[in-house]
């Protein structure tokens, strides 16, 4: 079953949580340097999607993208 595979992987490997860095200083500087409305819209939509994913009880923060 998938639960058995998940357990086996977690016993053998270490995992650490990485969160999207859309608000980091480096990314904001990069985004501002591009001055691209399409890119800005994409980032805003991904942020909105991540909020919905994080609030969903069957998913949670671990399923956020970006």
Image: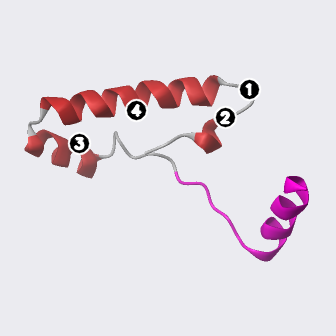
Instruction: Examine the rendered structure and indicate whether residue 55 appears above or below residue 24.
Output: above
State the image quarter where residue 14 is shown.
Answer: bottom right
Kindly check if marks 2 and 4 are in contact, taking CB atoms under 8 A apart as contact.
no
Q: Secondary structure at mark 1?
A: loop
User: What element does badge 2 sit on?
Assistant: loop
Residue at 79%, 76% in the rendered image:
12
Q: Residues within 10 Å of mark 2 (few under 14, many from 20)?
A: some
Q: Nearer the viewer, mark 3 or mark 4?
A: 4
**Range drawn in magenta:** 1-18
Answer above or below: position of 5 versus 46.
below
Residue at position x 79%, y 66% in the image: 10
Q: Position of residue 13 (x, y in %)?
A: 73, 74
Q: Is residue 9 magenta?
A: yes
Q: Is residue 29 left or right of residue 51?
A: left
Residue designated by label 4: 46
Q: Which residue is mark 2?
A: 60
Q: CA distance from mark 3 to mark 4?
A: 15 Å
Label 2 and label 4: CA atoms lie apart by: 15 Å
Q: CA distance from mark 2 to mark 3?
A: 25 Å
Is 8 situated left or right of 13 in this image? right
Which residue does the image show at 69% across and 34% down from the upper left?
A: 59
Residue 15 image point, x, y percent: 67, 64
Q: Are marks 1 and 3 in contact (CB under 8 Å)?
A: no
Closer to the N terminus: mark 2 or mark 3?
A: 3
Quadrant of image for the C terminus: top left
Q: Who comes first in sequence, dot 3 or dot 4?
A: 3
10 Å crowding of disc 3: few (<14), some (14-19), many (20+): few
- For residue 11, above or below residue 44: below
Mark toward the start of the polypeptide (2 vs 4): 4
Residue 28: mark: 3
Numbered circle sitting on residue 57:
1
């Amino acid at each position: 079953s998938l639960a058995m595979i998940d357990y086996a992987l977690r016993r053998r490997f270490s995992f650490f949580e990485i969160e999207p860095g859309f608000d980091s200083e480096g990314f904001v500087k990069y985004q501002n340097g591009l001055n691209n409305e399409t890119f800005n819209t994409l980032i805003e939509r991904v942020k909105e999607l991540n909020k919905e994913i994080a609030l969903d009880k069957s998913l949670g923060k671990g399923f956020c993208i970006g």
